Amino acid sequence: MRISLLLIWLLIAGQGLAQQHNDLTIVYDISISKTKRSTGLEETYNGGTRTVFIAGNKARIRMVSLMRMESIFFEYDSTLKQAAVIKESGAKKYRFNLSAPQWEGFNKKYEDADCSFENDSMLIAGYWCKKAVIHLTSGDKIVAYYTSSIKPANGFTEPSFTCVPGMVLQYEHTSRRGMVVFKASQVSREVIAKEIFVIPSAGIQLRKYTAEDNSD
Amino acid sequence: MADKYSNILKPLQEHELTPPAGAFEKAWENILLLNEGRDHSEEAPKNAFEKLQAFSIQAPELDFRSLLRGEKNSPAKKQTIVISQNFKRLAAVLALAVTGAFIYMAAMPDDKNGVNNEQYAGARMNKESAVNLMIDSAQDTTALAGAAAQQPALAKAATATGNTKNEKKQHYSEQAGFYNNDLFFTLVNYKEYGKEKLFTKALKEKRVTLNQFSYVNLSDKMVAMLQEVYLTKKNGNMARKAKRAKRKFEKWKKKDEKYFDKELDKNPADIIDLSEFLMKN
């Protein structure tokens, strides 16, 4: 009996270790609609993707659109160590680094954001999602649909969703002139290649982020 | 142990001794005398067999019960215990081996050859930069071949990515093809940069695919606008509409750079910043 229990424990522990990667990739499709009829600049972002890669203590958000490609690399332990923003496209590619307080300052608009929850639900990328409305201090609102089946990304990676109790798979911002929607089209648990988290340096100019930080 | 017994039993099975003369008759007589109460008649053997036919012995109950209870000292039970213990030991060894394999797979670094090996450090760096510079394309094979020829490291990286030992890893290789990774610029100026195939493919599929997780779906409006850029007059020169479209694109590019690249306080991947920018322009 004891031997059997020990064996079961060892097997579970072994499998647990083998599946401990917890890597997550979410691809959000961007769709933009404007009230005005004529085709404008929004078409250069419409149809693009925003991909979130999370593995261990690293994360990366990559945005790809016709107009530009940009990535934000994160490295953290219990707190954010550093965020690096890289413009990957164009003649002048550049990078700037942000310390944890600077990153907070960069996302100051999400400070003290509140969530309210509604009963609506929607099936997104195979997950049933509940509706939440994020109220920003500026008066802006983000309508988000989240699933409790996936552990939410930490507040460093997605500072706009700190009050949402699950992984957001769709979010939208509506204004008088139109609407921007980010909707998950793929959720992958496959192991992410290490190279994805390597910050490129060749041919990239290092710039200094000069905006005031939020530390005081 | 088993071999020892089989060696004894086989010759024993074949062993025979010839009884002394008259021994069988004498024995039979004694049996009849003992069992049949000294029946000397000629029918004695027949009677003996009939009685023997009707004879029955009640099987001892205790044996069955002990078997059913599985008494510890019964030989059958002992054999079962021995087999059971051997099976458990074997199962334990197998389970430890499987667990060990799981732990090894989980803990083993992915790039065994690359880590701490200076000889390959340069190649690894090239691979990383090639993957991360994301010289993307819409799978234009001509462009890929050209770019690979110019950048052997990229070709090497592509091979390395293809041969990765962990096939469960996400396929994230990207192909070269876009000038400065700039999708918009390349599509608008495809003739100048020899990207005809790339342009045709993008417009036909209404999609530019960089890899499994990065792509751009082109709206009908955008496809129409891109086609507009290449309208020509009868003499082959750019049509007025085309010139206007090109100027518009350049204006958009400047606006985008001014908004996101000048002060660095806006983030295009942020929905509020992006929405604010797009709705104003």
Image (spheres, grey):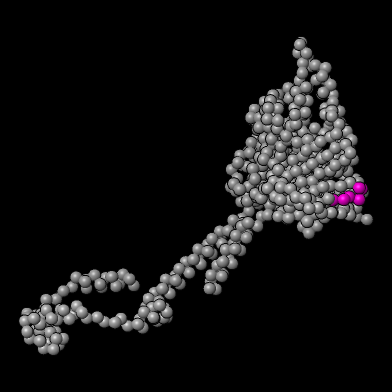
Q: Is residue B17 above or below residue A135?
A: below
Front position in the image: A96 or A79: A79
**Residue visible at 92% across and 48% down in the picture:** A138
* B96 versus A128 height, above or below: below
The spot of residue B191 in percent (x, y) is 73, 22
Name the magenta segment's main secondary structure.
Answer: loop
Q: Residue furthest bottom?
A: B37
Number of numbered markers? 0
Residue at the image position 10 percent from the left and 86 percent from the top: B39
In the rendered view, would you say B148 is above or below A22?
above
What percent of the width, then of the height, locates residue A158? 80, 50
Q: Residue at x 56, y 66 (%)?
A: A8
Q: Where, quadrant-wise, is the C terminus of chain A in this rendering?
A: bottom right
Is residue A100 shown left or right of residue A20? right
Viewer-proximal residue, B74 or B213?
B74
**Residue B26 locus on image (x, y percent):** 9, 83
The image quarter in which residue B162 lies: top right
The reply to whether residue B166 is in sight is: yes
Is residue A105 at least partly visible in the picture?
Answer: no
**Residue B97, magenta (yes or no):** no
Residue A78 in which image quadrant: bottom right
Region of the chain picked out in magenta, as a range: A134-139
Residue nearest the observer in this picture, A72 or A129: A129
Q: Nearer the viewer, residue B256 or B279?
A: B279
Kindly identify the residue that appears in the image at 66 percent across and 32 percent down: B139
